[in-house]
Amino acid sequence: MSGMKSKRHAEILELIDKYDIETQEELAEHLNESGFSVTQATISRDIRELKLSKVSGSNGRQKYTAFIKPSTEMTDKYSRVLKEGYVSKEVATSMIVIKTVTGMAMAVAVAIDHMELPGVVGCIAGDDTIMCALRSREDAHLVMEKISEMLR
């Protein structure tokens, strides 16, 4: 990146931080006032290169903002949490939703988990609903049949 381009990019980032700039024309005016001679094409390219987005400002108008990537520090923190809490992973291509009596979903989900039905990857329970993740559609149908047999 040329020196002039990097100076212009730095100026753009400062301007959008300082002012609510809604259009490329407004941005061009601010840059011209700051001593940068720019064309519409240059502004458009700069916006793309800087990955600027438009968000709603406090006044309800749109304004440019810089898309901020999570810092390396945060990414490292999330990686550590993942490593510390991780047990296993598995792809599930099918789901079964089971409705229960209010307040019983957790208990039923635990029961299903402990039955070790073939194909069940895991269950998530709310108050009266369970989502069971299964390895395949075939496993989903087999588990549905097993549960139906147990309910007879």
Image (cartoon, helix red, strand yellow):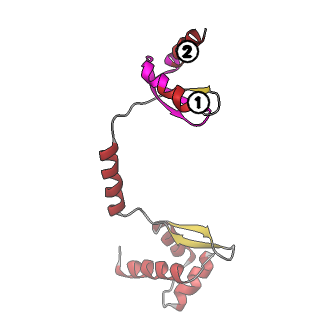
Q: Which mark is residue 104?
A: 1
Q: Nearer the viewer, residue 34 or 104?
A: 104
In-image side of 85 versus 103 (left or right): left
Other residues around mark 2 within 10 Å, as few (<14) / some (14–19) / many (≥20)? few
**Percent x, y of residue 25:** 62, 79
Q: Measured along the vertical axis of the image, is residue 127 above or below residue 4?
A: above
Q: Secondary structure at mark 1?
A: loop
Q: Secondary structure at mark 2?
A: helix
Q: Residue furthest right?
A: 60
Q: Which mark is residue 124?
A: none
Q: Quadrant of residue 77?
A: bottom left
* Three-letter residue code for mark 2: Ile
Q: Dividing the image into 4 quarters, which one contains the N terminus?
A: bottom left
**Percent x, y of residue 14:** 47, 82
Picture residue at 46% right of the left edge, 82% below the top: 11
Q: Dot 2 corresponds to which residue? A: 147
Q: Quadrant of residue 20?
A: bottom right
**Percent x, y of residue 138:** 51, 16
* Three-letter residue code for mark 1: Met
Q: Measured along the vertical axis of the image, is residue 56 above or below residue 34?
A: above
Other residues around mark 1 within 10 Å, as few (<14) / some (14–19) / many (≥20)? some
Picture residue at 60% right of the left edge, 34% below the top: 103
In front: mark 1 or mark 2? 1
Res 93 visible: no
Residue 149: say if magenta: no
Q: Which residues are magenta?
A: 111-139
Q: Measured along the vertical axis of the image, is residue 105 above or below residue 40?
A: above
